[in-house]
Amino acid sequence: MTDLAKPATRPANPNFSCGPCTKHPGWSLANLENALLGRSHRAKDCMARLKLAIDKTKQILGVPEGYVCGIMPGSDTGAFEAAMWSMLGARGVDVLAWESFGSGWVTDTVKQLKLKDLRTFVGDYGVLPNLAEIDFTRDVVLTANGTASGVKVPNFDFVPADREGLTLVDATSSVFAQPIDWAKVDCLTFSWQKVMGGEAAHGMLILSPRAIERLENYTPPWPLPKVFRLTKGGKLIADIFEGATINTPSMLAVEDYLDALRWAEEIGGLPALLKRADASSKALNDWIDRTPWVDNLAIDRATRSNTSVCLKIVDPEITALPEAEQAAFAKKIVALLQKEGVANDIGSYRDAPPGLRIWTGSTVETSDVEALLPWLEWAFAATKSELAKAA
């Protein structure tokens, strides 16, 4: 492998993981020196920092008046499951999935909540299910951006404004990088570790007035764990959405998230964040278009993610191999690039088709993506050469 000339330029930041994602440009541990460590999260100062994280989130995302936003335990999973356990079951439910994480919500509704009036719409990796078949007189559960497949909903036009049911949207790998049509969303969740490159274990739950009404007028028939309880005495626990978290948060992680939000404000807020993700994903997709051995896993260009770009190897000599050998080939590319220190954590998700997965979210520098591209070429050629020698 060392016989092939290596590219001259390396990415300044080799971190392209799809979660936890890379820190924002200029991040430093020194940015967190004012974190309120060793303090009760119920202390006045700590509550103020938690409330600030909520307020800045709402401000940057343009969350409408009347919506509430709260910090939840268990990352995006905890936030989304709290919403499902608390609100589903009041009417029929349609659940959409086209990759691993959406399939997890299908599993929750089928095997855990055991909803009786349930329809599931499952698309293969690379394609969306038929959005025209969704019935919005029912509650609808969907993932805005499939992190493991690189397939997103192109927009929220398919959601009627006069819907009868609620829309529950897992937006963890789309928020801060893709526009959110808040009029079409009743519940939205995400984690700090994704597009903003924060630390893990904390999720955000945003609820519309219609979602709040459901919570206050519907009692689910199953027990609710303490970390899922959003109401008390038939009323929303408003303190959760003012910084009084259900369980103890990490004030160090809070400070890190605030630092990411500060950076977002400094560069121009949401428009700048969206622009950065679009630029990085365009650089990668333009290279895919001109490179014969690789293709985007997402078939329809309108559904291609601008954050979690998933690549499949389409070189005929490689696709002719048994699937296990194709997977091994892709893993060798991943290992080689990591060994060279130019790309960390770019293997496809364990349940996804063999290939590569490169994060191009808002904290990624387009220049780093551009510097990575010749290395992808080099690693493919080197791995294929090694395969030919072994034949």
Image (cartoon, helix red, strand yellow):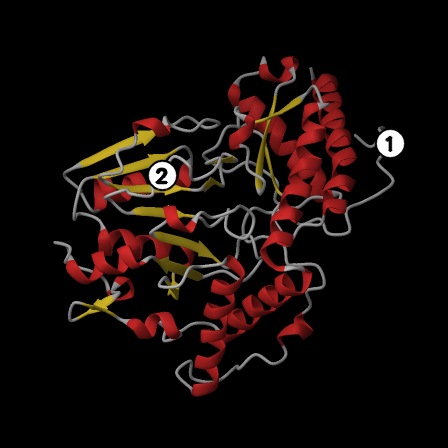
Identify the residue at horizontal 24%, vertical 42% (top origin): 109
Q: Which residue is mark 1?
A: 5
Q: Is residue 143 visible?
A: yes
- Which residue is at the front of the view, 361 or 21? 361
Count of numbered circles on the image: 2
Q: Which mark is residue 159?
A: 2
- Which residue is at the front of the view, 355 or 61? 61
Identify the residue at horizontal 21%, vertical 56% (top origin): 214
**Amino acid type indicated by mark 1:** Ala
- Which residue is at the front of the view, 141 or 200? 141
Q: Quadrant of the C terminus?
A: top right
Left or right: 173 as drawn, with respect to 246: right
Q: Quadrant of the N terminus?
A: top right
Q: Position of residue 246 (x, y in %)?
A: 33, 71
Left or right: 92 as drawn, with respect to 9: left
Q: CA distance from mark 1 to mark 2?
A: 51 Å
- Seen in the picture, residue 225 relative to 160 is either above or below; the reply is below
Give the mark, 1 or 2, whose residue is nearer the N terminus: 1
Q: Quadrant of residue 211?
A: bottom left
Q: Is residue 341 visible?
A: no
Q: Position of residue 131 (x, y in %)?
A: 36, 30
Give the SS element for disc 2: loop
Q: Residues within 10 Å of mark 1 (few under 14, many from 20)?
A: few
- Seen in the picture, residue 97 relative to 196 is either above or below; the reply is above
Give the SS element for disc 1: loop
Q: Quadrant of residue 313?
A: top right
Q: Are marks 1 and 2 in contact (CB under 8 Å)?
A: no
**Amino acid type indicated by mark 2:** Val
Q: Position of residue 240 (x, y in %)?
A: 34, 71
- Seen in the picture, residue 333 relative to 275 is either above or below; the reply is above
Q: Residues within 10 Å of mark 2 (few under 14, many from 20)?
A: some
Left or right: 121 as drawn, with respect to 21: left
